Image (cartoon, helix red, strand yellow):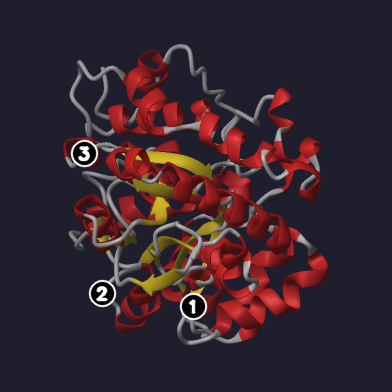
Amino acid sequence: MSGLADLTLGFIPLTDCAPLVVAKAQGFFAEEGLEVALSREASWATIRDKVAVGALDGAHMLAPTALAPAGLEGGSMLAPLALNQNGSAITVSIQLAALMAEADPGALAAPLVTAHALAAVVARRREQGAPPLTFAVVFPHSMHNYFLRYWLAQAGIDPDRDVRLVVTPPPRMVEHLRSGEIDGFCVGAPWNAAAVDEGLGESLIKASQFWPGGPDKVFGVTAAWAERHGDELRAALRALIRAAAWADEPGNHAELVALLSRPDHVGVEPEIVARALKSEIVFHRNAAGLPRREHALWFLSQMVRWGQVEADLDLAAVADRVYRPDLFREAALSLGPVLEPAQVFADAAPPASALFDGARFDPADVRAYAASFAVGRAG
């Protein structure tokens, strides 16, 4: 008997659930005295709701969901660990990709301005009286929603007026592209690769091109749970940090791919899982696990830009309440020589702040940044 509570942790079938899967499979949770059951969930809304009401002790979570107003009303979420950087991409149907190539072949050939080819297609459809194109994102408060909106708006496409955005759970994206219900999507690995592998879609821009080293998922718990279960949270963070370091090791990738490919985890062919692990997703190196205040503020800037938060919300206070690098540091330091400190605390160097369009984010002036874009609802 360890004296620690048994935990149930939720995850969505995505490649970036790897730290939870590895910590369970490699015995890192058990070595911390935790008996952990992993629960494969159907959608991000389910994850949010189950964590909020205590049906899950913690979960693989969209970082903006932890910061979102709904989460705060539900009792305040904490994000004491970032699970990964990069991993998502924007993919369109092969039919739409062909129309884009016809409309503006030069733009389609250059990933950073590809959306300009889409803008030409959108304009042509409007002239023809055709219905707007439909794109899917995984949740309104998600990196994927902000990534897609930013990319569209950079080309002059208003995501609320010129196209139709719908919410679709990640594992259903390929099915909906195949049926023609959607024309494209932004989702995490491995679902972009799965669409390309089936010959259904073409990936246009990856997260690492959109924002090198940009944030994605976190490990989320409620503040109330963390207060009651401080020892369990510290133990879980230690196990997850070790798992993230293990997952980054190229020598472990064959075993990681086999683990994630299992039907009870992600459930797709190994070669599809392997694709994003080669050069895209980072779990641990370069201090990827540290929940950075700047990242929280960027997510909040996008909530302001797209009208998702009240004008008087204290953004800095929300970032400081939800993102908890102090809890990450405490857990990581207690691991001692197990981990290389330079890998864990590389935050002495500031994170890359320039996105694909060259615009730099100033975390000291979030609202001015949010209002600086030609397309948006801020200001």
Residue 209's place in the image compared with 39, above or below, is above
Q: Quadrant of the C terminus?
A: top left
Residue 357: which quarter of the image? top right
Give the residue at mark 1. 266
The front one of 34 and 320 is: 34
Residue 105 lies, in percent from the top left, at: 57, 58
Residue 359's place in the image compared with 256, above or below, is above
Q: Residue furthest front?
A: 1
Q: Amino acid at mark 3?
A: Gly
Q: Nearer the viewer, mark 1 or mark 2?
A: 1
- At 30% across and 70% down in the image, what residue appears? 182
Give the residue at mark 2. 181
Distance from the alpha carbon under mark 1 to that under mark 2: 23 Å
The front one of 137 and 334 is: 334
Q: Amino acid at mark 2?
A: Glu
Q: Is residue 140 left or right of residue 171?
A: left
Q: Amino acid at mark 1?
A: Val
